[in-house]
Image (spheres, grey):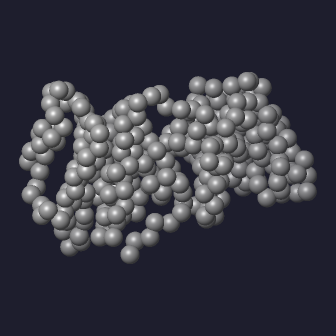
Amino acid sequence: MISHPVPACSCCGAPTPDDKRIDVRFGLPDAVFGGDEQARRHPEGLQALLQADGHGSFVRCLLPVRLTDGIELVIGTWLRITDADLARAAEAWETPAYRDLVFEGTLANATRPWQDRRLDSRVTATVLNEGEIPYVTAAKSTAVSEVLTDEWNRDYVLSRFGHALPVPVRTRVDGRWSIERTPGLQGRVVDGSHRFYGPGRTVFLDALTRREPDADLEAQLAALLQGAPSVPAEQQLTEREPGCLRHAFWTTTVREGKEQHTLYGFVVVPGAALVTGCVFDETADLAWARHVWRSIRVEDGEETTR
């Protein structure tokens, strides 16, 4: 049986079974990413300190964000600091003087959904715990201060991160739809279409607008099912809701001597449909695939940020 472990902490690699704190990180400052590795140095071999030719000096820090449902998102980001502060940090990092370190600098990563307000914003980072890298504790701009002090809608924020997360995340699709990205799945957009994937599980999504918006839902579904494989009745489900028709069927194929299962799910509303394919390795994950299909819903209003 394939397990679906809770993701490890991005900063240290330790397990994070507590879903009330979610850790994600940037591997490098934006300006350094993709550059010459030979131009990077870690003073005293400290991975939290970085000097890059042509880009300056940086220290890794933690940006805490409060989310709804009592979740704390801790973003491992980079702070651009002076060369003198980098030298000071390298000297004190593994000594008792570490607890007294305070840095003034500018954020070196832009993060959705705050990318327009974070990059190059001046902040203060302070050592709060001897066993952790410094935390961003204050900001010069009101916009960045809001990131630190306000409570943000968990789905609005977490759906912007492609990392595998230990909690379910409701994700907007094509502005009209939403679906649950289940725990442990990474997310990305490929050619405009959403993809979720993890060990033994993959989800594909495709939002469609019908050319015959006045056609009844059964007719719209029948058009979508043209050319679909024929499967036994026990491998199909049809569910009706006011203004919405759901249909799913699932198949099993053998590839390279290994069974692979796919649930094809359809959710049809007047003039539009969302089609999902849930691919899974283990038969028992059919319940997971059904859950993902049933989690699809139409969103009427704008996405809530707070």
Residue drawn at 39 percent across, 45 percent down: 179
Residue reaching furthest to the bottom: 1
The image quadrant of residue 236 is bottom left
| Residue nearer the viewer, 66 or 49 | 66
Residue 81, given in percent of the width and then of the height, sits at 76, 35
| Residue nearer the viewer, 144 or 36 | 144
Screen quadrant of the C terminus:
top right
Residue 152, given in percent of the width and then of the height, sits at 62, 37
The image quadrant of residue 279 is bottom left
Residue 114, relative to residue 224: is it above or below? above
Screen quadrant of the N terminus:
bottom left
Residue 4 visible from this viewpoint: yes
Residue 13 visible from this viewpoint: no
Residue 37, relative to residue 230: is it above or below? above
Residue reaching furthest to the front: 242
Residue drawn at 78 percent across, 47 percent down: 134
| Residue nearer the viewer, 74 or 35 | 74
Residue 188, given in percent of the width and then of the height, sits at 41, 44
Residue drawn at 43 percent across, 50 percent down: 181
Q: How many circles with numbers are drawn on the protein?
A: 0
Q: Is residue 3 left or right of residue 158?
A: left
Residue 263, given in percent of the width and then of the height, sits at 25, 57
| Residue nearer the viewer, 44 or 208 | 208
Residue 132, relative to residue 121: is it above or below? below
Q: Is residue 86 left or right of residue 21?
A: right
Residue drawn at 37 percent across, 41 percent down: 297
Q: Is residue 277 left or right of residue 32?
A: left
The image quadrant of residue 194 is top left
